[in-house]
Amino acid sequence: MAKKIFTKDNSTYIIVILAYIIVEALIGTGNLSSLMKGLLVPLCVYVILAVSLNITVGILGELSLGHAGFMCVGAFSGAFFTQLVGDSLNGGLRFAIAILIGAVVAAVFGILIGIPVLRLKGDYLAIVTLAFGEIIKNIINILYVGTDANGLHISIKNAAALNLDPETGRIIIKGAQGISGTPSDSSFTIGVILVLITLFVTLNLIHSRTGRAIMAIRDNRIAAESIGINITKYKLLAFTVSAAFAGIAGVLYAHNLSSLVALPKNFGYNMSIMILVFVVLGGMGNIRGSVIAAVVLTLLPELLRGLNEYRMLIYSVVLIAVMILSWSPTAKAFRERYFGFLSRRKKEVS
C-alpha cells in the first residue's frame, strides 16, 4: 500500500520536501527575514490542521467546527506532560512522548464527542462541534492544576484552593494564565516531518479499503449501509483520526510558545473557521490543495503587511476570487477542457 501511495501522490510529498530544502537554503544564506522564520512552525501547524480537517469535511463529508477544540486539548495535554517531567527526560524523547500524548488525548476526546455527535449531520453537527470547542476553551480558562510530593491537585476556583505544599508544590496550569515556561522543542524540521507523517497516514487512509468505505458513506449513506458498511464505525474512525492529528498540531504549536493561553484567537471559533477556509479553498477532499491553501493564506497577510490598512481588504478580495475560480461551473469546465487537452497531448507524444 505504501508503494502505491508514493507512486500516485508523490507530487504532494515532493512539494513539501522541495519547500523545506528551499527554506533551509534561504536560512543558510541569511536571505530569510526574522518575521518569516517565526512563521515556519505555525505554517506546519496550519498544514497539519488543514489536512486533518479535510478527513472529516472532505473525505467523510461532515461539517465540523470543533477542530480548534481538539487542537486545544492536544496543546495543553502535551505541554502539561512536558512541564510535569521537566528535565528528567531528554528533550527529544520528551517532545516525542508529548506528541503521542497529545494525539491520544485528542483521539479519546474525538471518540467521546463523536459517539453522540455523529448521529447528527449538516448544520446541527456544525453547531454541536462548535459548542464543544468553546466548552473546552472555557474549561481550560478556569482550570488550576498543581503538583507536589502528594501528587496532582486540581481546582476550578483559584490557585489557593489547590492547597499545595509550600516547599515542593508548583502550579502547572494557572487558569486564564494558562501554562508558562514550556520549552521550545518545536522546530521547522520537526514540523515538516510531522507534516509528511500526516500526509502519509491520510493518503494511505484515503486509498485504503477503509477510505473507500468512508467516501461511500459520504456519497450515499443509504447505499453504503445497504451493502453492509458499518456507518457508525467508519464515521467515528475518520473523526478520531482527524482529532488525533489536530492534537499533534496542538503539541507542535504549544512547544513553539513560551506561554500557552486558551484565547479565542488561537483556540476559539475564529481558528476553526480559518482552518475550514483552508480546506474549502484548497478543495474538499483535495489533500494537496489543503497544503497549498494553508501556506498561501498564512503567508499572504504577512506579505501584504507593508500595505497597512489595505492588506486585509486585499486578502478578502483574494479569497473571493479564489472561491469564484475554484467553484464556479465556468471555471470547472475550463479546467476540465485544459487538463483534458494536456492529457491527450501527452498520450499523443508518448
Image (cartoon, grey):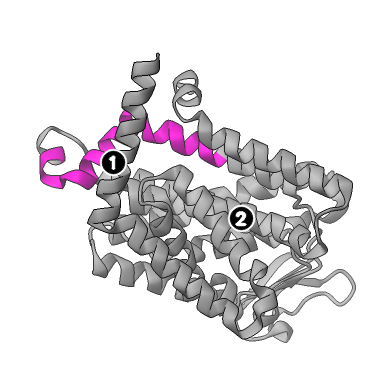
Q: Nearer the viewer, residue 233 or 337?
A: 337
* On-image quarter of the N terminus: top left
In-front residue for pair 155/85: 85
Q: Is mark 2 on a helix, strand or loop?
A: helix
226 on left or right of 56: left
Residue 330 rendering spot, x and y as whole percentages: 25, 55
Tell me the magenta residue range: 198-224
The foreground one among 41 and 180 is 41
Above or below residue 266? Residue 113 is above
Neighbour class for label 2 at 10 Å: few (<14), some, many (≥20)? many
Judged left or right of residue 269, residue 298 is right
Quarter of the image for the C terminus: give it: top left
Closer to viewer: mark 2 or mark 1: 1
| Mark 1 lies on residue | 336
Q: Nearer the viewer, residue 164 or 123?
A: 123
Query: Mark 2 belongs to which amino acid?
Result: Val
- The secondary structure that dominates the magenta segment is helix
Mark 1 element type = helix
The residue under the point 11% across, 45% down is 222
Coordinates of residue 250 in the picture (x, y in percent): 60, 58
Query: For residue 45, which numbered disc appears in the image?
Result: 2
**Image quadrant in which you'd find residue 151:** bottom right
Estimate the spatial distance between the alpha carbons at disc 2 and disc 1, rounded to whole Å.
32 Å
Residue 216 in the image: above or below residue 126: above
Amino acid at the residue labelled 1:
Glu
